């Protein structure tokens, strides 16, 4: 499928960043947001010089401020340089409905994944959740703060990868190429989360599969509102609902539902070990099945493109 405008029609005045330049700029926006956010965070004691967050407040700051700055940098590029509205990167109609539906689906996927691993003997209860704690009110504060944090973080990654990058590549090279490039780059972006291990390797494979599934979801819906909700729900319930690792990162809070840990002697490929359920074969099977189901629901529909206009192909460096 050559050339498809995924989320909104392309108009003559719209610019599109070159594909290779978009990959480079994506890295610049991601790193730029992190660096800008760290400038006040280090003296405030929220983040150490090496980038390690300190406590749940540091995690919340990183998720809201540092990822939020990345979203602002990219949105500014789209609005002022590319001269395009945010609807062209997937923020189009029925936003609240699509976000809430995607959030519910994401929660369902995570519950199913953890449930299967539990049923296979991969997890045991390590402690009660926040509702079993005497300090219920204080325990809900970090849960709520990180709920907002994961909405910002998950949405930012969707803006960069499925909203902007995938849309640009699809508009020139077709949806198949866009899905492959987007998913591989998304996996590589998480490859440095932990020290090299076999669970990291499977985790990266699963994140590539996640990128494929969520890319298909966005293309099928013609919007990124739903995938923003899905991504936010998965990360939040994974780390805050069950106390499990989120791509290798452990949140220092009392879980909302129950505190789970890997059963002693359980195989790493079942639990994901130090990387968390995202490095489990259960996740592999679920994502493969979900991707196949979305892909087989009929042809994807894009928007018609106008006749080529020279000014619409302004290159970037």
Image (spheres, rainbow, N blue to C red):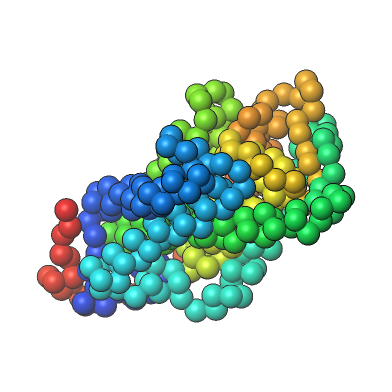
Residue 250 horizontal/vertical position (percent): 63, 38
Name the image quarter holding residue 138.
Answer: bottom right
Q: Is residue 221 left or right of residue 127?
A: left
Residue 288 drawn above or below residue 66? above
Residue 171 horizontal/vertical position (percent): 31, 62
Count of number-bearing discs: 0
Q: In this view, does 235 lie to the left or right of 207?
A: right
Query: Residue 239, can we see it?
Result: yes
The residue shown at (38%, 72%) is: 86
- In the rendered image, the residue lying farthest to the left is 310
Residue 193 drawn above or below residue 112? above
Query: Residue 170, can we see it?
Result: no
Q: In this view, does 241 lie to the left or right of 69?
A: right
Q: Is residue 149 left or right of residue 281?
A: left
- In the rendered image, the residue lying farthest to the front is 43
The residue shown at (44%, 68%) is: 90
Residue 9 horizontal/vertical position (percent): 34, 76
The quadrant of the picture occupied by the N terminus is: bottom left
The residue shown at (58%, 35%) is: 248
- In the rendered image, the residue lying farthest to the top is 265
The residue shown at (55%, 78%) is: 94
Residue 187 drawn above or below residue 81? above
Q: 66 or 268, which is in the foreground?
A: 66
Residue 190 drawn above or below residue 74? above
Residue 225 horizontal/vertical position (percent): 53, 68
């Amino acid at each position: 499928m050559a050339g498809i405008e995924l989320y909104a029609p392309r108009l003559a005045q719209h610019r599109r960043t070159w594909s290779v330049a978009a990959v480079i700029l994506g890295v610049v926006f991601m790193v730029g947001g992190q660096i800008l956010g760290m400038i006040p965070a280090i003296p405030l004691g929220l983040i150490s010089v090496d980038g390690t967050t300190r406590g749940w407040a540091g995690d919340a700051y990183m998720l809201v401020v540092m990822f939020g700055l990345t979203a602002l940098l990219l949105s500014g590029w789209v609005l002022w340089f590319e001269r395009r509205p945010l609807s062209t990167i997937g923020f189009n109609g029925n936003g609240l409905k699509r976000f809430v539906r995607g959030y519910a689906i994401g929660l369902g996927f995570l519950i199913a994944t953890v449930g299967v691993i539990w049923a296979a003997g991969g997890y045991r209860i390590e402690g009660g959740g926040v509702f079993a704690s005497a300090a219920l009110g204080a325990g809900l504060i970090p849960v709520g703060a990180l709920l907002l944090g994961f909405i910002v973080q998950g949405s930012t990654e969707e803006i960069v990868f499925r909203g902007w990058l995938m849309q640009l590549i699809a508009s020139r090279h077709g949806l198949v190429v866009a899905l492959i490039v987007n998913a591989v780059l998304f996996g590589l972006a998480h490859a440095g989360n932990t020290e090299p291990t076999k669970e990291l390797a499977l985790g990266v494979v699963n994140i590539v599969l996640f990128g494929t599934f969520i890319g298909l979801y966005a293309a099928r819906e013609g919007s990124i509102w739903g995938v923003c909700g899905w991504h936010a729900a998965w990360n939040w319930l994974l780390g805050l609902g069950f106390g499990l690792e989120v791509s290798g990162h452990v949140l220092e809070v009392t879980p909302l539902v129950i505190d789970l840990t890997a059963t002693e002697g359980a195989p790493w490929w079942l639990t994901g070990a130090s990387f968390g359920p995202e490095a489990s074969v259960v996740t592999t099977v679920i994502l493969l099945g979900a991707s196949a189901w979305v892909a087989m629901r009929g042809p994807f529909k894009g928007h018609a493109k106008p006749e080529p206009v020279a000014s619409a192909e302004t290159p970037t460096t």
